[in-house]
Amino acid sequence: MSPKCRSRCPRPLVFAAALAACSLMPIWLASGGAAAFEVPSPYSERDPDRLGWYVPDFAVAHTGSYLGALGAGFGYSVFDDVINLSVGYGFTPAAIAALDVHNLWMRGSIRPIALRYRAFRFVPVYLGGGALYAVGDNFFTRLPEPYSEDYYAKTAWMFLGQVGLAVDYLPEPGGAFERHGLYAEVAMHDQTMKILAKELDALRFVDLVASGVGYRMAF
Amino acid sequence: MGWPSCVGALAMLFGLGGCFEATPFSADVEEEDEGTIGKNLARLSGAPTAIRVVALGDTHHSYRDMDAAFPFINARAPELVVHTGDMTNQGLLFEYEATKRRLDELSAPYFPVIGNHDALSNGKEIYDEMFGPLDYLFRYGPFVFIGFNANALEFDGQVPNRPWLEAALESVRAAERVILFTHQVPYAVDDFDGGDTSAYLTELFRRHRIELVIHGHIAQRYLRRSGPTLTLSTSTFEGGDYSVIDFRDRGLTVEHCTLGDCVPAPVPPIVIEPIPLGGGDVL
């Protein structure tokens, strides 16, 4: 690793820890047989809305997958946590990205499968998509004169797709929090997707995807 | 597929193949990619009086075309390669890296200038770190190569750096042959309303003895002359287009190539005529 902290640190410890947390549990469960799983109805008990619609259903702390080195957000779960919608802010300091980068993000994800074992719930796969809005003088959404409006793509916006997995711990009912969860995901953005669609082998795999992890606290 | 296999596949996806990228707008250039112009200058040796130069530009996302064309360029064994800018579409680090990886496959040292697309997002900072100065001059035998940034719009009207450019041209000695390269069409620079960049460059070129001006930015390849100065437009690289310039002891010849197919470009005789505007679609 170079002396300065780099933005692309393959297999950082934090990611490895989250990955282990997410992946070891199904191994453990599998060793006990698939009968250990319960598959709850997706529209029943995954996310009781105790606090009313005006209170967000969860908050997240996130790092990586293009959303920022440090990030936080909040969101709503609909259809009993099958669909998540969230917004947030991400920051990547110059120590990591050579320049400070501030961004806002919004994202949605679908989590159709949830496997329950005792106080844990495992979401083996979720699919997500969203948009990133970069803030700063180097980014724009409207072009100044004398550019024509379509001369450049809008550099402030970037669209993202994600695939990930999550594991939640469900404390005893009645507490302040419904769940504490860890998730790990990989993301692609629209600029690489465009190239991928045209020239499948033009980019390296590490150019195409970014990994990220997060903590999700539901209430 | 059993659970262990599924988990193994996921581990491959997340942990081994994945890459922890905090932002797509990173300007954190890998150390081995830094200072490319300086490194390539160090590769020039000797003082040849006749050299072969390949000029190309506007490579954007033409990765497949670069992969296909660069072996043909290497086969022509140029002394150096000039890239007239627009290595990227959005000025993103992964775009710079994807292009640089391919340029590194060239057997000859290459010398880029920044294009207007390269200056988007955090592209200016990436270019500066990955390649080096936006304006630079180097001598190779009797040849003086001057690469300069003329993207007036993307640099808030602060370029070209007029004092630097004038000093560079003033430093040229009598027997030296001057080759300028830049991204914008010098005679039709994208400029702010009321901007005088084109008029300034046209007048500057008229006052100095410049053998060849190489530019990109437009989707038209041509070789034109105004007075003693030839102007070569590299056009877009899509399809694998580039030009091969052979500087002889006196004069030069140009071939326009697409992949391995090259045809001589007629070098217009010296006549006094108005300097042509660029023409062609802007890239």
Image (cartoon, helix red, strand yellow):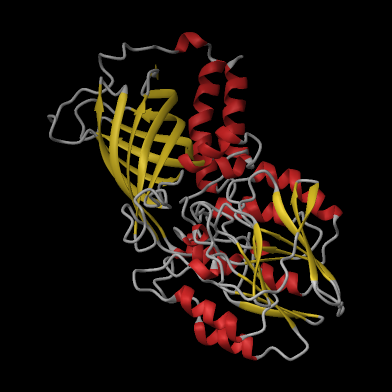
> Is residue A3 in view from this perspective?
no
Check the image and name the residue furthest to the top.
Answer: A35
Q: Quadrant of residue B155?
A: bottom left
Q: What is the x, y in percent for residue A212?
A: 47, 42
Q: Quadrant of the N terminus of chain B?
A: top right
> Is residue B194 in view from this perspective?
yes
Q: What is the x, y in percent for residue B131?
A: 62, 67
| Residue at screen point 44% across, 70% down | B152
- Foreground of the two, A26 or A197: A197
Q: What is the x, y in percent for residue A165?
A: 45, 29
- Foreground of the two, B66 or A124: B66
Count of marks overlaid on the render: 0
Q: Quadrant of residue B214?
A: bottom right
Q: Quadrant of residue A80?
A: top left
Q: For this view, does A189 lie left or right of residue B227?
A: left
Q: For this view, does B254 lie left or right of residue B223?
A: right
User: Compared to B213, does A213 lie above or below?
Assistant: above
User: Compared to A173, does A196 lie above or below?
Assistant: below
| Residue at screen point 82% across, 54% down | B74
User: Compared to B2, does A85 lie above or below?
Assistant: below
Q: For this view, does A112 lie left or right of residue B225?
A: left
Q: For this view, does B184 lie left or right of residue B131?
A: left
- Foreground of the two, A214 or B181: B181
User: Compared to B9, does A75 lie above or below?
Assistant: below
Q: What is the x, y in percent for residue B31?
A: 64, 64
